[in-house]
Image: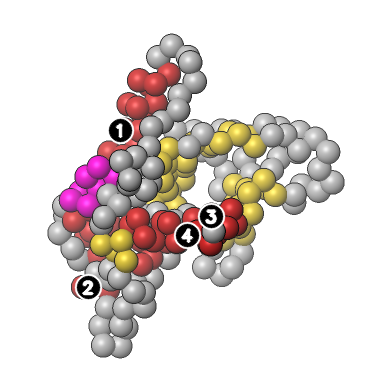
């Protein structure tokens, strides 16, 4: 929280020379890549090429670095490091190391491996894009099966627009036979509601 605004606040960096400037530049590079992909999606959605550019000024996109400890005592390779879920935002760009373990669920409901490929990112669609596109683009269910005896590292970048951005069904994604499925909301309202649904302690805080 910064200046009374949710979803914003200072970053906390380790005391490592050059770390902060490196991460800030990487964040900007990832945001630029995400917006390049979003511009390509405007062609299929039938909207102005700069539609997402306008809504991603001062975004609340998030870059995370995640460590999955080795499962030396796991009884099964099916033991999960992250249960099945979808991401909240528009798109997620995921860099993963060579340990593997990421799986995505296809349209048939089957879990398939998303193995690491050198020099590439895994691109997942998020819930906010499903709202905008009226489920023309569905969010990608995925999970992590922790490899046995191996540390796993990943760096997901969650592309999320300015918090005041209206999230409503795009004109080309609705019709009389396919009306809008979701109520109009904002980026901040949607993300905060998803956080409250996911994290029990936030529900307790709001109730008190």
Could you say which disc has been placed on residue 28 in the image?
1
Mark 4 or 3: the one toward you: 3
Judge by depth and name the residue closer to the eye, 201 or 118.
201
Label 2 – label 1 distance at C-alpha: 30 Å
The residue identified by callout 2 is 172
Q: Which residues are magenta?
A: 53-59
* Few, some or many residues within 10 Å of mark 2 (<14, 14–19, 20+): few
Q: In which quarter of the view is residue 100 placed?
A: top right
Residue name at image x 35 percent, y 27 percent: 24
The residue identified by callout 4 is 194
Q: Earlier in the sequence, mark 3 or mark 1?
A: 1
Residue name at image x 29 percent, y 45 percent: 59
Judge by depth and name the residue closer to the eye, 166 or 147.
166
* Few, some or many residues within 10 Å of mark 4 (<14, 14–19, 20+): some
Could you say which disc has been placed on residue 196 in the image?
none
The residue identified by callout 3 is 205
Q: Furthest-front residue in view?
A: 208
User: Where in the figure is residue 163, as x and y percent of width and height?
Assistant: 30, 52
* Few, some or many residues within 10 Å of mark 3 (<14, 14–19, 20+): few
Mark 3 or 1: the one toward you: 3
Q: Quadrant of the C terminus?
A: bottom right
Label 3 – label 2 distance at C-alpha: 39 Å
Residue name at image x 41 percent, y 56 percent: 191
């Amino acid at each position: 929280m910064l200046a009374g605004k949710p979803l914003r606040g200072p970053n906390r960096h380790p005391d490592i020379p050059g770390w902060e400037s490196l991460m800030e530049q990487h964040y900007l590079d990832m945001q630029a890549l995400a917006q390049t992909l979003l511009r390509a999606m405007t062609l299929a959605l039938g909207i102005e090429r700069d539609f997402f550019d306008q809504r991603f000024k001062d975004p609340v996109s998030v870059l995370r670095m995640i460590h999955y400890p080795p499962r030396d005592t796991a009884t099964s390779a099916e033991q999960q490091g992250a249960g099945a879920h979808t991401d909240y935002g528009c798109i997620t760009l995921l860099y993963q190391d060579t340990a593997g373990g990421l799986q995505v669920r296809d349209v048939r409901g089957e879990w398939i491996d998303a193995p690491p490929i050198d020099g590439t990112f895994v691109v997942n669609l998020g819930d906010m894009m499903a709202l905008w596109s009226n489920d023309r683009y569905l969010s990608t269910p995925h999970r992590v099966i922790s490899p046995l005896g191996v540390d796993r590292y990943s760096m997901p970048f969650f592309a999320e627009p300015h918090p005041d951005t209206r999230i409503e069904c795009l004109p080309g994604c609705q019709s009389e036979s396919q009306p809008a499925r979701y109520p109009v909301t904002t980026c901040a309202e949607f993300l905060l509601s998803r956080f409250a649904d996911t994290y029990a302690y936030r529900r307790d805080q709001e109730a008190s």
